[in-house]
Amino acid sequence: MDFTVIANAVEVDHGIKRLSMRFIKKYADPERDRLSREFCDQITTELAEQGLITLPRRLPTSENEFVFVIQKDSSIGQAVQIASSVARLDKFDMLEHSALGSHNYPAMRDYLP
């Protein structure tokens, strides 16, 4: 897997890029017929080694879906990591008087690992 093109595209766009899963698969393994859950997890790991995170964190297996690829050390990457940490704390009911609960933000569950 060579994600250099994706890493460069994200950097050029100030730390964030919206990409289709079809485009990501093209650089991960163009010969592959479909995206499996295991393969998507492998892609996530490889992107992390390039200093990139994805939203949603669990990549979809549909090539028609779009995801955001974010540079970890960019401003938006740091904000996403902080927000993700706070959401995880809320998920485990470790925040007092939290307004983040899934009843207030049901779509949030799609973006958490």
Image (spheres, helix red, strand yellow):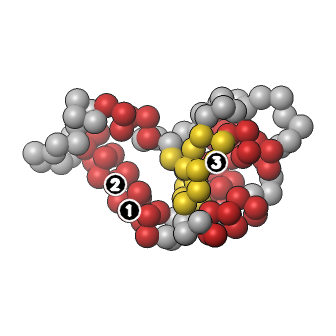
Q: CA distance from mark 2 to mark 1?
A: 6 Å
User: Left or right of 53: which side holds 2?
Assistant: right
Q: CA distance from mark 3 to mark 2?
A: 21 Å
Residue found 44% across the figure and 64% down from its top: 76
* Label at residue 83: 2
Q: Give the image location of residue 73, x and y in percent.
A: 51, 70
- Determine if residue 57 is in view: no
| Secondary structure under the numbered disc 1 in the rendered image | helix
Counting residues from the start of the chain, the first of labels 3 and 1 encountered is: 3
Q: Give the image location of residue 98, x and y in percent.
A: 16, 45
**Which quadrant holds residue 107?**
top left
Residue found 31% across the figure and 46% down from its top: 87
Q: Residue furthest left?
A: 97
Which residue is the site of mark 1? Answer: 79
Which residue is the site of mark 3? Answer: 19
Mark 3, mark 2: which one is toward the viewer? 3
